[in-house]
Image (tube, grey):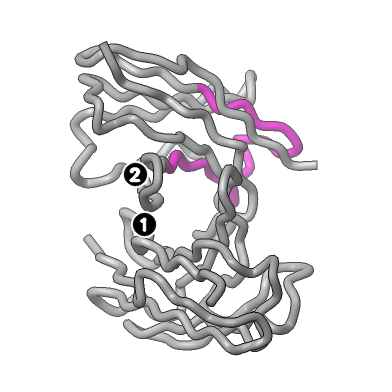
Amino acid sequence: QVTLKESGPVLVKPTETLTLTCTVSGFSLSNARMGVSWIRQPPGKALEWLAHIFSNDEKSYNTSLKSRLTISKDTSKSQVVLTMTNMDPVDTATYYCARMASGYYLYWGQGTLVTVSS
Amino acid sequence: EIVMTQSPATLSVSPGERATLSCRASQSVSSTLAWYQQKPGQAPRLLIYDASSRATGLPARFSGSGSGTEFTLTISSLQSEDFAVYYCQQYNIWPYSFGQGTKLEIK
């Protein structure tokens, strides 16, 4: 059974760095056909694709957020980590991790709401 | 970067009727397009991939069509559980991108 679960702070202050962890089970991050993405959704707004990491550690980032994002993985811990620097209230959103299958997302985490406020 | 545009933003349809949702890509994405359904408080659910392939267990009333830059999600006879927000996503060119969503509401 494939599961993904996001964890991290529920509240961060402006200018701080956000670190989110996605813990997966039911598959290995070293599987050559798999990869994990981070996707976010501000309250009442659309989904926004953020970043992706492949099994070979290759990465891809949202063009407009690239300078603020870093994605990494720890295969032994079955974790994918996303860091986002210089957080702003507009970054308030539910952050999802999702497993990619040939480009689309069959499996999603439940999401974690992060609020940016002083 | 590919921009995905969905229309309409909100669609009001009566139960039992047909709903047609559109998604347009700013450049060709071939058939590498997916559709998702999202209900309040839930993660998105994959409905359609490769433009027209139904996800496992998806009722046959859902169908996807199109290629290149124009895509359509059709729900042939709306059930109460189908009223939700629908998103398209291209996975042809990195960075991948989602549309802004279509809210399907009860008329």
The image quadrant of residue B90 is: bottom left
Counting from the top left corner in percent of width and height, residue B88 is at 44, 67
Q: In the rendered image, which quarter contains the N terminus of chain A?
A: top right
Which stretch is magenta? A21-39
- Horizontal side of A104 relative to A46 (left or right) equals right
- Res B11 visible: yes
Q: Which residue is mark 1?
A: B96
Residue in the image at 61% along x and 37% along y: A110
Judge depth for marks 2 and 1 and give the one in front: 1
Residue in the image at 75% along x and 76% along y: B59
Residue in the image at 45% along x and 34% along y: A95
In the displayed structure, would residue B96 be above or below residue A30? below
In the displayed structure, would residue B20 be above or below residue B82? below
Check disc 2 and give the amino acid type: Ser
The image quadrant of residue A66 is: top left
Q: Among all residues in the image, which is located at the extreme front?
A: B107
Q: Does the magenta portion include A55? A: no
Element marked by disc 2: strand
Q: Which dot marks residue A37?
A: none
Element marked by disc 1: loop
Q: Which residue is mark 2?
A: A60
In the displayed structure, would residue B60 be above or below residue B93? below
- Res A51 visible: no
**What subunit carries mark 1?**
B
Number of marks:
2
**What subunit carries mark 2?**
A
B18 or B44: which is nearer to us?
Answer: B18
Check disc 1 and give the amino acid type: Tyr
